[in-house]
Image: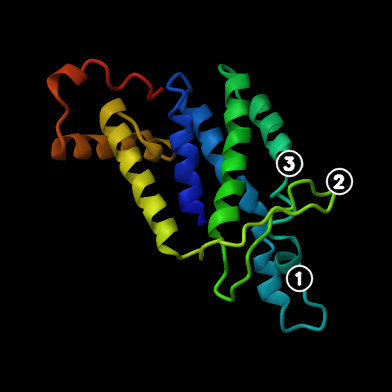
Amino acid sequence: MNSITHALVGWCLAETAPRLTNRERGVVVLAGVAPDLDGLGVVPEILTRNGSHPLLWWSTYHHVLAHNLAFACLVGVVAALITKTNRLLTAFLAVVAVHLHFLGDLVGSRGPDGYEWPIPYFYPFARVELSWKHQWALNGWQNILITAVLLGVTFVLARRRGYSPVGLLSARADRAFVFALRRRFPLPAAMLGESDAGGA
């Protein structure tokens, strides 16, 4: 799955715990995207592919270094260390977000060449790989549908709660986004008092 879908999964997961602060929600979202850090090797690989000593960091390490249980545990520890209010809950949700990333890649990351990405879940301790023979294409309709549903859920929650993932980047832009959303789709009078509670 692409990083936007992984981020939306992380956001919707964080929204299952309304008491999280904006920072803690951001940590869960980043955790949902973090396994793709092992894909950054694509840059040196592209830059050196025509040289005498190409760096095959993407081909060798993508879906390996950060797509395993050890990395998920590391993310959980980091999440606990960088949060204050809801440490254990944030760490737990961060680990779940990483595992949802694995699941998304397991079912929906087949490349255009037909390669089905396995998940080396117990790396580096064991060479057991998880795979699914029915993995759909990265740009398959299934991924598009999942992304559309997650966007819909995100918009509904933003309209109701008064904040959105935009607030992870800019509080001002988030207020403008929610205002525009509520102007287009007004809240019922009964919901006005209960919204805007979790934007802090």
Q: CA distance from mark 2 to mark 1?
A: 22 Å
User: According to the image, label 1 marks what residue?
Assistant: 56
Between 66 and 197, the residue placed more toward the observer is 66
User: According to the image, label 2 marks what residue?
Assistant: 125
Amino acid on which disc 2 is placed: Phe
Vertically, is 173 above or below 104? above
Q: Where is residue 1 shown, x and y percent of the image?
A: 52, 56
Amino acid on which disc 1 is placed: Leu
- SS for dot 1: loop
Answer whether labels 1 and 3 touch (C-beta < 8 Å).
no
Question: Dot 1 surroundings within 10 Å: few (below 14), some, or many (20 or more)?
Answer: some
Question: In this view, which residue lies farthest toward the right?
Answer: 125
Tag 2 or tag 3, which sits nearer the N-term? 3
Vertically, is 48 above or below 92? below
Amino acid on which disc 3 is placed: Leu
Residue at the spot 70% in from the left edge and 49% down from the top edge: 66
Vertically, is 148 above or below 177? below
Q: CA distance from mark 3 to mark 2?
A: 10 Å
Answer whether labels 3 and 2 touch (C-beta < 8 Å).
no
Question: Dot 2 surroundings within 10 Å: few (below 14), some, or many (20 or more)?
Answer: few
State left or right for residue 53 relative to residue 23.
Answer: right
User: According to the image, label 3 marks what residue?
Assistant: 69
User: Mark 1 or mark 3: which is in front?
Assistant: 3
Q: Is residue 118 visible from the viewing direction of this image? A: yes
Vertically, is 193 above or below 162? above
Residue at the spot 73% in from the left edge and 55% down from the top edge: 64
Q: CA distance from mark 1 to mark 3?
A: 24 Å
Q: Where is residue 94 shown, x and y percent of the image?
A: 60, 33
Between 148 and 18, the residue placed more toward the observer is 148
